Amino acid sequence: MKQLEYFLADEAATIAIGSGLAEVLKNATVQQALVVYLNGDLGAGKTTLTRGFVRGMGHTGNVKSPTYTLVEPYELGEWRVFHFDLYRLADAEELEYMGIRDYFNNDCCCFIEWPEKGTGLLAKADLIINIAYQDEQRVIKLQAETVHGEQVITALAE
Ligand code: ADP
Ligand code: MG
C-alpha cells in the first residue's frame, strides 16, 4: 500500500493517527526507525499528530512544540524520537551546526514539520504526511516513500 487517506473529525482523531503509528513501530518484528515529513498549514495538526506518536511511544510528560528550539528530543526505552519544527530555521546550515546527521540513526524516529526548510540535509522520508483543513476539521494523507513506509501504512490500515 502506498497511500492512505482519512477524515479527521477532531483533535482526538489526529492524535489517534500518531499513536497508531507508534503501535505499528512497537509491534514490528524488526525494530526500524521512521522518518516522517509533516506538511500542512499552520494549525493543521502536525504537532498534534506528533504528540500522539510521542505519547504512544511511552512519553508521559508534556510534548511542547519545538518552534524555538528547532528540535525536541525524547529517550523512550530503546527508541529515540526527535520532533523537529523547522519553520523558524533561517539557514539550512544551522542544521549542520546542530549535528543533524546524528539524528538519522537506526534507533531514531524523526518527525519533521516544515521539512522543505531543510532540503538537502534531511534523511529521505519513509512517509510524507499531509494534513489539510476541511472547514473546521481535517483530512490526512499518508504517502509511503520507501518499502518501510509502505509496510508501516499497510499495518496502520489493518
Ligand atoms: P501545527 O503543528 O500543524 O501548526 P498544531 O498541532 O499545533 O498545528 O495545532 C492544531 C490545532 O488544531 C490544535 O488547536 C488542535 O486542537 C486542532 N486540531 C487538531 N486536529 C484537529 C481535527 N482533526 N479537527 C479539528 N481540529 C483539530
Ligand atoms: Mg507545529
Image (cartoon, helix red, strand yellow):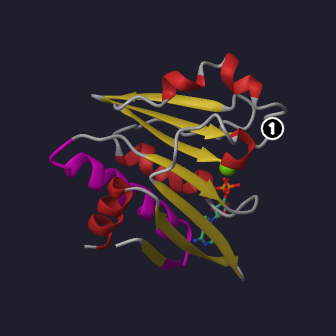
The residue lying toward the viewer, choosing from 124 and 90, is 124
Name above or below for residue 73 compared with residue 34.
above
Q: Position of residue 158 (x, y in %)?
A: 25, 73
Name above or below for residue 16 compared with residue 63.
below
Residue in the picture at 36% in, 40% down: 33
Q: Is residue 9 magenta?
A: yes
- Left or right: 154 in relation to 53: left
Going by the numbered disc 1, the residue's amino acid type is Arg
Q: Is residue 10 visible?
A: yes
- The residue sitting at the right extreme is 90
Q: Position of residue 44 (x, y in %)?
A: 68, 64
The residue lying toward the viewer, choosing from 106 and 10, is 106
Q: Position of residue 116 (x, y in %)?
A: 71, 48
Q: Quadrant of the N terminus?
A: bottom left
Element assignment for label 1: loop
Q: Is residue 114 visible?
A: no
Picture quadrant where residue 89 is located: top right
Report crowding for label 1: few under 14, some 14 to 19, many 20 or more residues within 10 A (C-alpha).
few
| The magenta segment | 6-30
Q: Main secondary structure of the magenta part?
A: helix
- Left or right: 108 in relation to 43: left
The residue lying toward the viewer, choosing from 57 and 149, is 149
Q: Position of residue 7 (x, y in %)?
A: 52, 80
The residue lying toward the viewer, choosing from 101 and 76, is 101
Q: What residue is pinned by disc 1?
A: 88
Residue in the picture at 64% in, 78% down: 137
Picture quadrant where residue 97 is located: top right
- Left or right: 75 in relation to 47: left
